[in-house]
């Protein structure tokens, strides 16, 4: 099976400026995501979908492929992930001249996901003929502790 991993990372974050470039233990969220996804046994191609030259230049250090630049129309606060991924799939299939059977969305803001989480999802998806699979984790503390009052 051909499996496309897509890391969506637009440049115009409103809440946390340049959030995809923020670091944890001296590694950017994008670097962590790239390194984790590259350990997957099943992802055939891993690409970045971004509108930001700063982000695109950053990921080139980690040999992450950027076969196209995302349009500004798909990089707004109101852009839907579905539209971004559909665009990435269409452009990737054309660029690589191949069809992909599965798409794995790897958001940089999920830095604690492991390659085993990715591979387990892919295995479940294929084995059970699911249409979709998502990872979730029960928090170690009450979720309302995460809330902030301005």
Image: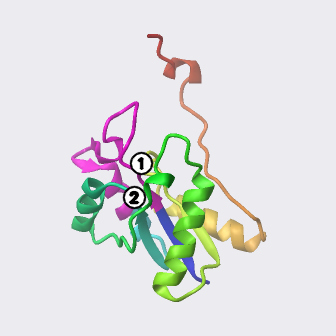
Q: CA distance from mark 2 to mark 1?
A: 18 Å
How many circles with numbers are drawn on the protein? Answer: 2
- Residue at (39, 58) in percent of width and height: 50
Question: Is residue 43 at least partly visible in the picture?
Answer: no
Looking at the image, which is closer to me, 36 or 131? 131
In the image, which disc is placed on residue 111?
Answer: 1
Which of 120 and 68 lies nearest the eye of the viewer? 68
Quadrant of residue 101 in the image?
A: bottom right
On screen, residue 150 versus residue 18, left or right, reads right
Q: Nearer the viewer, mark 2 or mark 1?
A: 2
Q: Which residues are magenta?
A: 7-35
Spot occupied by residue 48 in the image (x, y as percentages of width and height): 40, 64
Q: Is residue 114 magenta?
A: no
Secondary structure found at label 2: loop
Q: Which residue is drawn at the image coordinates 50% and 22% (left, top)?
A: 146
> Which residue is labeled 2 in the image?
50
Q: Position of residue 63 (x, y in %)?
A: 28, 72
Q: Is residue 15 magenta?
A: yes
Mark 2, other Cα within 10 Å: few <14 / some 14–19 / many ≥20: many
Q: Is residue 10 visible?
A: yes
**Quadrant into which the C terminus falls:** top left
Place of residue 2 in the rendered image (x, y in percent of width and height, measured from the top left):
58, 82
Q: Which of the two residues, 110 or 84, is positioned nearer the viewer here?
A: 84
Q: Residue placed at 48% from the left, 45% from the top?
A: 76
Q: Secondary structure at mark 1?
A: loop
In the picture, which quadrant includes the N terminus? bottom right
In the picture shown, does residue 109 fall above or below 4? above
What color scheme is it? rainbow
* Image: 5 above or below 16: below
Labelled pair 2, 1 in contact (Cβ < 8 Å)? no
Q: Specify few, some or many for label 1: CA neighbours under 10 Å numbering under 14, 14-19, or 20 or more.
A: some
């Amino acid at each position: 099976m051909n499996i496309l991993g897509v890391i969506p990372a637009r440049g115009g974050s409103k809440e946390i400026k340049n959030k995809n470039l923020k670091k944890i233990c001296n590694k950017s969220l994008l670097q962590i995501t790239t390194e984790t996804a590259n350990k997957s046994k099943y992802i055939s191609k891993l690409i970045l979908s971004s509108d930001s030259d700063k982000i695109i230049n950053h990921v080139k250090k980690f040999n992450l492929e950027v076969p196209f630049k995302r349009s500004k129309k798909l990089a707004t606060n109101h852009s839907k992930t579905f539209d971004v991924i559909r665009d990435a799939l269409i452009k990737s299939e054309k660029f690589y001249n191949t069809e992909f059977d599965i798409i794995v969305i790897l958001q940089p803001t999920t830095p604690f996901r492991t390659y085993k989480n990715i591979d387990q999802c892919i295995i479940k998806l294929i084995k059970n003929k699911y249409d979709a699979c998502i990872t979730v984790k029960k928090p170690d503390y009450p979720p309302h502790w995460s809330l902030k009052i301005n």
